[in-house]
Amino acid sequence: MSRLTIILGTLIFLTSCSEINTTDPEQVYKYWSGLSAPADLELIEGQYWQSAHWTKEYIMFLKFNPTKEWWVSFLDQNQLVIDNQWVKPSNAPEWFTPPDESVMYSSGDSFDQGSRYFRDTLTNQCYIYEIQL
């Protein structure tokens, strides 16, 4: 085995074995989407956990104020559908409280791990709970 293979293997092993935890909404958005938040998206609260496993297992909570265009585009791109079934996870942060008047969406997929997307019909404030395990 070459020295280069050993060095590269060690680097890959070490960089893929660190868990991620943050409550900085900007960082939460970036870990979740892979991009910095657009200027017209007001991020309010966030919580993100990602396992050290290479499969990118994560749990994300986000509270934010999007533009109407951003939200409509998000629903369309992700093919989200209105859903009325959800159980709030026990590990949800205290601030993650979508109001009763929120419209709730899901992927409508048969493999539903519980991810939900909420938009308050009075304030247009949005909440996202996304889980991939």
Image (cartoon, rainbow, N blue to C red):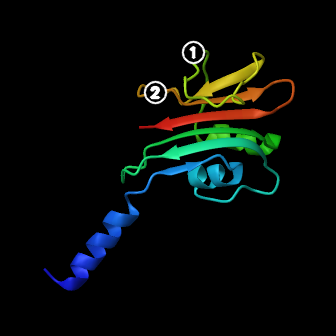
Disc 2, SS: loop
Disc 1, SS: loop
108 w.r.t. 51: above or below: above
Q: Amino acid at mark 1?
A: Gln
Q: Amino acid at mark 2?
A: Asp
Residue at x-position 72% and y-position 24%: 98
The quadrant of the rendering that contains the C terminus is top left
65 w.r.t. 83: above or below: below
Q: Quadrant of residue 16?
A: bottom left
The numbered mark at residue 112 is 2
Q: Quadrant of residue 94?
A: top right
Residue designated by label 1: 85
Residue 39 percent location from the top left of the image: 81, 57
Residue 107 percent location from the top left of the image: 54, 31
* Mark 2: few/some/many CA within 10 Å (<14, 14-19, 20+): few
32 w.r.t. 59: above or below: below
Residue 78 percent location from the top left of the image: 58, 40
Instruction: Please state if 75 lies on the left or on the right of 48 as rendered.
Output: right
* Circles 1, 2 touching at the beta carbon (< 8 Å): no
Q: Which residue is at the front of the view, 85 or 58? A: 58
Instruction: Please state if 84 lies on the left or on the right of 97 as rendered.
Output: left
